[in-house]
Image (cartoon, helix red, strand yellow):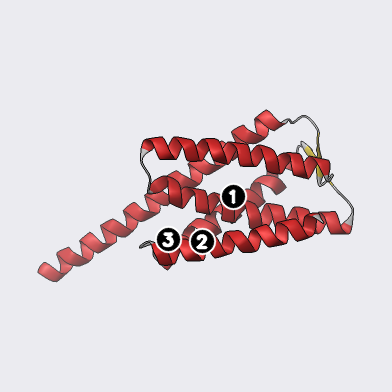
Amino acid sequence: MVITFYFTISWLMMGLLIFNRQDSQISRSDLLFLVLLSCLINTHTYLGFFETFKWLKTTTTPKLYIAFILFRSLFIPLFVSYITLHLTNNTLKKALALVLMYCLIIIGIDKINLNSELYNFKKWNQFITVIYYLLYLFFVMFAFKWFRGLQCQEVKNKDDVGRK
């Protein structure tokens, strides 16, 4: 049941990202950078911190472990990418409401994962989970703004070369 849930939600998030890209003027390189960076950060954080320090105990059941991998490597990076795209293009009030909704969704997803026994907490709790995902979101958002700034400088440099 959980594997179907994460598979369906991941496809939904992929569709939302593609639709959002067609609806707004986001380049492919922006979208690829955002998704790949968020996937890299989330996967390495789980493997580097959570597995090393044994803060979370993941399941050993094959079906549930596949659901956990879909959650960790597909759903969360796509979800964070989608939220980041909306945060960079909205006003402060909408951005704060979006961050609050993000926190509530993370708590709900965490409850689903705990109830379906994808993982168990050891030296960890849901408050720290929300803090982790907020830090993760803000880091990805600032990296995305930095990446867009690099592209603006590149365009400016091309214009300067053309004028000489």
Q: Closest to the observer: 144 or 102?
A: 102
Q: Could you say which disc has been placed on residue 17 in the image?
A: 2
Residue type (three-letter) at the residue carrying disc 3: Asp
Residue drawn at point x = 54 percent, y = 59 percent? 36
Q: Tags 1 and 2 in contact by the CB under 8 Å rule?
A: no
Q: Could you say which disc has been placed on residue 41 in the image?
A: 1
Seen in the picture, residue 98 relative to 78 is either above or below; the reply is above
Q: Position of residue 74 (x, y in %)?
A: 65, 58
Q: Could you say which disc has been placed on residue 30 in the image?
A: 3
107 vs 37, left or right, is right
The quadrant of the image that shows the N terminus is: bottom right
19 vs 161, left or right, is right
Whichever of callouts 3 and 1 sits on the residue coming sooner in the sequence is: 3
Residue 119 sits in quarter: top right
95 vs 104, left or right, is left
Residue drawn at point x = 53 percent, y = 55 percent? 37
Whichever of callouts 2 and 3 sits on the residue coming sooner in the sequence is: 2
Residue 55 sits in quarter: top right
Residue type (three-letter) at the residue carrying disc 2: Leu
Q: Badge 3: few (under 14), some or many (20 or more) residues near its Cα, within 10 Å?
A: some
